Image (cartoon, rainbow, N blue to C red):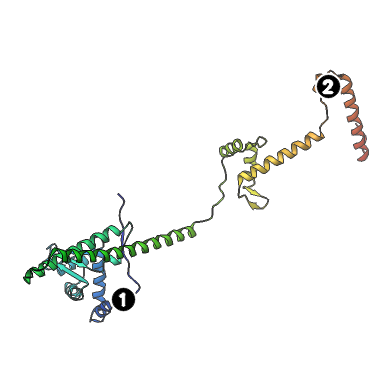
């Protein structure tokens, strides 16, 4: 299972929260605010819960040991957080109420939020039942508790839908940013095996793959003065050039060869003599044009 990474997401109006502003205005408030942020970081992986394990005589002393902060400053911070509802104590568990909404996580956080809210809802129900019991209230029925639970569940469902919508929008934006950052595809020169494979696939019978590779390798894989962009298109152009060149050679070649004359029962000796005579005439014409004597 892969490692999970957590981070603290401060809202843009975090320091405008009246409770945070009041904390900062206290003498030494910036130190207390820094301690509060450290406590939020410590509680990221435990859904906002800090547990007093009794290593030191006091919870503040234990946190001082962990954070290397002054114990007195930590005690002042804890007292303020508890008084403002930013921290809730139950036995040895101290829950920071803002941790979940400020927590970022590399995997889906919906289940974690759901578990916390279910635990919080159950604690509220237990606290209410305990209060009613202490006040000797005996007229509370199961129907009343059920109705309250249904109302809480409806509100929690609405919050979960809002969270899912926000996460979907964030995921869409992240994918769009990744697509914009993708670099343009760069030309990768082919290997000889790739040339041979494409020749067979495209049926390029006139392309000499070794000649093609050596030619463009010597030129640095450029066409003219521009870098090559598509070597497959270059192979198809090579094929067309070879086909056109073959057609020209075929048109300029003699209509009959010695083998053709022999195959059709002609006079081979006469054909050879007539061919020599034709070549001699052509040589004389060229020599005349160049003011040279024929051989």
> Residue 263 falls in which quadrant of the image?
top right
Estimate the x, y position of residue 205 in percent, counting from the top left: 66, 34
What residue sits 22% from the left and 61% below the top?
A: 118
Q: Of helix, strand and loop, which one carries label 1?
A: helix
What residue sits 32% from the left and 67% below the top?
A: 9
Q: Is residue 37 visible?
A: yes
Q: Is residue 227 above or below residue 6?
A: above
Q: Of helix, strand and loop, which one carries label 2?
A: helix
Q: Is residue 46 visible?
A: no
Instruction: Name the side, left or right, on which 164 lies relative to 132.
Output: right
What residue sits 56% from the left and 37% below the top?
A: 193
State the residue in front, 153 or 279. Answer: 153
Estimate the x, y position of residue 250 in percent, counting from the top left: 78, 34
> Residue 136 falls in which quadrant of the image?
bottom left
- In space, the residues marked 1 and 2 are separated at their CA atoms by 103 Å
Name the image quarter holding the C terminus. Answer: top right
- Name the residue carrying label 1: 15
Estimate the x, y position of residue 186 in percent, counting from the top left: 55, 52
Instruction: Name the side, left or right, on which 104 lies relative to 273.
Output: left
Estimate the x, y position of residue 124 in percent, counting from the top left: 17, 66
Instruction: Name the side, left or right, on which 213 lies relative to 295.
Output: left
What residue sits 70% from the left and 41% below the top?
A: 240
Q: In the rendering, which numbered label is found on residue 261?
A: 2
- Dot 1, how many residues are within 10 Å of its Cα: few (below 14), some (14-19), or many (20+)? some
> In the rendered structure, which disc, 1 or 2, sits on the residue that comes first in sequence?
1
């Amino acid at each position: 299972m892969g490692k999970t990474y957590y981070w603290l997401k401060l809202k843009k109006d975090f320091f405008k929260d009246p409770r945070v502003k009041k904390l900062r205005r206290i003498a030494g408030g910036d130190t207390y605010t820094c301690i509060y942020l450290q406590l939020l970081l410590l509680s990221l992986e435990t859904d906002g819960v800090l547990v007093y394990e009794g290593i030191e005589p006091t919870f503040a002393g234990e946190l001082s040991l962990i954070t290397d902060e002054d114990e007195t400053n930590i005690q002042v911070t804890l007292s303020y957080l508890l008084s403002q509802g930013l921290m809730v104590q139950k036995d040895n568990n101290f829950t920071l109420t803002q941790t979940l909404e400020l927590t970022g996580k590399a995997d889906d956080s919906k289940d974690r939020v759901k578990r916390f809210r279910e635990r919080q809802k159950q604690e509220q129900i237990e606290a209410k039942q305990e209060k009613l019991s202490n006040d000797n209230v005996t007229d509370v029925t199961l129907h009343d508790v059920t109705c309250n639970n249904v109302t809480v569940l409806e509100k929690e469902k609405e919050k979960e839908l809002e969270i899912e919508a926000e996460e979907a929008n964030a995921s869409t934006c992240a994918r769009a940013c990744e697509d914009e950052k993708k670099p343009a595809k760069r030309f990768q020169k082919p290997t000889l095996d790739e040339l041979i494979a494409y020749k067979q696939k495209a049926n390029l019978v006139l392309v000499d793959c070794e000649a093609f590779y050596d030619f463009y390798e010597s030129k640095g894989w450029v066409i003219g003065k521009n870098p090559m962009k598509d070597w497959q298109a270059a192979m198809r152009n090579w094929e067309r050039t070879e086909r056109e060149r073959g057609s020209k050679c075929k048109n300029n070649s003699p209509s009959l060869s010695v083998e053709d004359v022999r195959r059709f029962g002609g006079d081979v000796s006469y054909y050879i003599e007539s061919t020599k005579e034709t070549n001699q005439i052509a040589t004389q014409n060229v020599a005349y044009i160049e003011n040279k004597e024929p051989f």
